Image (cartoon, rainbow, N blue to C red):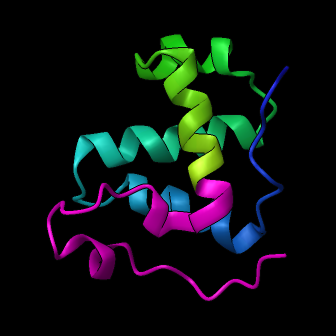
Amino acid sequence: MAVYVRPLSEQETQHIYHLLDSNIPEEVKKRLRIILYSSQGYKAPEITPKVNIHPKTVRKWIKVYDQHGFEGLLKKGENGGLPQLLGTPSVVRS
């Protein structure tokens, strides 16, 4: 069964593009790319070669984003400055 990220707002999409151009760790950028590709209709097996991550892990990050937003893409205990660096936009999710 295909797993896709929930529909992204224009603000979320623009925020992802902004973050991809910023100085954040490459692992976080890969996770952002997963979300972006999924929002464009790519399935996990199609995203895998683009980010060099197993399809199971791709699906995991999609689910994490759906549940926790941008902050969910950060590993707990990772660089304490990252949540502020991400500058998560105020978006109401249902």
Q: Position of residue 10 (x, y in %)?
A: 76, 68
Q: Work out whether residue 43 or residue 72 is closer to the camera in this orientation and state it.
A: 72
Q: Work out whether residue 90 or residue 55 is closer to the camera in this orientation and state it.
A: 55
Q: Residue at x 65, y 12 (%)?
A: 45
Looking at the rendered image, the quarter that the C terminus falls into is bottom right
In the rendered image of this protein, does residue 62 appear above or below residue 91?
above
**Magenta segment:** 65-94
Q: Residue at x 85, y 20 (%)?
A: 1
What is the quadrant of residue 36 in the picture? Answer: top right
Q: Position of residue 93 (x, y in %)?
A: 77, 77
Q: Position of residue 39 (x, y in %)?
A: 75, 43
What is the quadrant of residue 84 in the picture? Answer: bottom left
Q: Position of residue 35 (x, y in %)?
A: 61, 44
Q: Residue at x 59, y 55 (%)?
A: 65
In the rendered image of this protein, does residue 45 appear above or below residue 29?
above
Q: Work out whether residue 21 or residue 44 is closer to the camera in this orientation and state it.
A: 44
State left or right for residue 5 relative to residue 24. right
What is the quadrant of residue 38 in the picture? Answer: top right
State left or right for residue 74 relative to residue 48. left
